Image (cartoon, grey):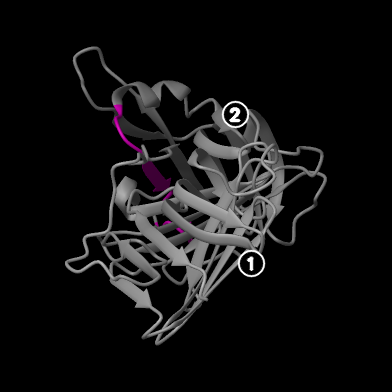
Amino acid sequence: KDIYFKKAGNQTNYTILKKLNDKNLAQEVNLLPTDYMTAVTGSFIYLGSTLNDYIGAGREYFYSSEEFSLFGYKNRMNVKVSGYDNSDWDGDFVLPDSYRSLSVGLFSNLYRYPFSSSKLGGLSWTGNGRGCNTSKSWMRVDQVTIENDALRSIDYRFGQHCEQDPYSALFGLVHWKSPRLNIGTKWQPTLTNIPNTSYIAIESDKGDYVGGGKNYLFTDENANIKIENTGNVLNVSVNGDTWWNGDFALPDTKVKIELGSFKNLIRYPFHNPRLGGLSWSGDGRGCNQLEGLFTVDHVKYDSSGLQSVDLRFEQHCEGNIPSLYGKIHWIRPN
């Protein structure tokens, strides 16, 4: 009925066991010890459900890092799963409004989000066309790492009882680490012919949501490129056969665009002003949460303001590994 993990001394993986146990939600938490993390490398999601649970349909599910995305903002998280088994899931987890950020702790008596109490928090896990009308749940955050306002890692487990039925439940374990960014100063666009005029080059990996795994090159001949600079922020817009917008903010200690690399950035304008921020979106696609950096290789000002700039950037959406890369080479028209 309930699900927990137990590791024998001669095992490299955990054996999943089921047994009948106390109905109390607080008792269920003890069936999911935190040591499940020691035998696993890489992010994963495990789901297991009792026989009569409507959402999980009595089955177990396991998803690796390539099959789901997770993003956190302030005191809430969202998980989206697109499994190789053609299953799909969507999870929302919200801590009480007294928490300004995701934090370690046990959160119980959670009703279905978004119809939950803001004082207690809320939880909802749906998928494969199935969802609860009402639910009562708990969530325990065992570990969380937040750096510069960005979620870097989290381990949590949860139990959801549809229609508040104490005899059936869906249980979950989530172990997530932000991918190591391939950020550095070496990336350059793979252009065969470098334009002599201003251009913007975009290259995206397969699986990147914003770029869609495609490459783009915009010049003054095939698009309207507009660059605006206010203080330490650079705004970019491209209007061609596709349209794009970019924002690049230097740390608030800078009064204008300067040479250098600016790392550990999250989405502009929700960024940490001490570090700076960035955002690249277009054609109706953008990140809810992102990590990235940008490097200013060249910048020149004159009496009329910004005269020219060369900037390269890398962006990862929702903690995913696929990247979007870009280079902006701009010279102010005469």
Q: Residue furthest top?
A: 9
For label 2, the residue is: 27
Magenta range is 40-57
Q: What amino acid is labelled 2 in the image?
A: Gln
Residue 177 visible within the image: yes
Q: Position of residue 232 (x, y in %)?
A: 65, 50
Image quarter of residue 227: bottom right
Crowdedness of circle 2 by 10 Å Cα count: few (<14), some, many (20+)? few
Provide the major secondary structure of the magenta segment.
loop
Q: Nearer the viewer, residue 215 or 136?
A: 215
Crowdedness of circle 1 by 10 Å Cα count: few (<14), some, many (20+)? few
- Estimate the spatial distance between the alpha carbons at disc 2 and disc 1, rounded to whole Å: 24 Å
Q: Could you tell whether 291 is left or right of 74 in the image? A: left
Residue visible at 79% across and 44% down?
Answer: 97
Image quarter of residue 119: top right
Residue visible at 66% across and 59% down?
Answer: 303
Residue 62 visible within the image: no
For label 1, the residue is: 133
Q: Nearer the viewer, residue 233 or 163?
A: 233
Q: Could you tell whether 325 is left or right of 225 in the image? A: left
Q: What amino acid is labelled 1 in the image?
A: Asn
Instruction: Say which element carries label 2.
Output: helix
Q: Nearer the viewer, residue 294 or 221?
A: 221
Q: In the rendered image, which quarter contains the N terminus?
A: top left
Q: Position of residue 172 (x, y in %)?
A: 46, 43
Residue visible at 75% across and 39% down?
Answer: 100
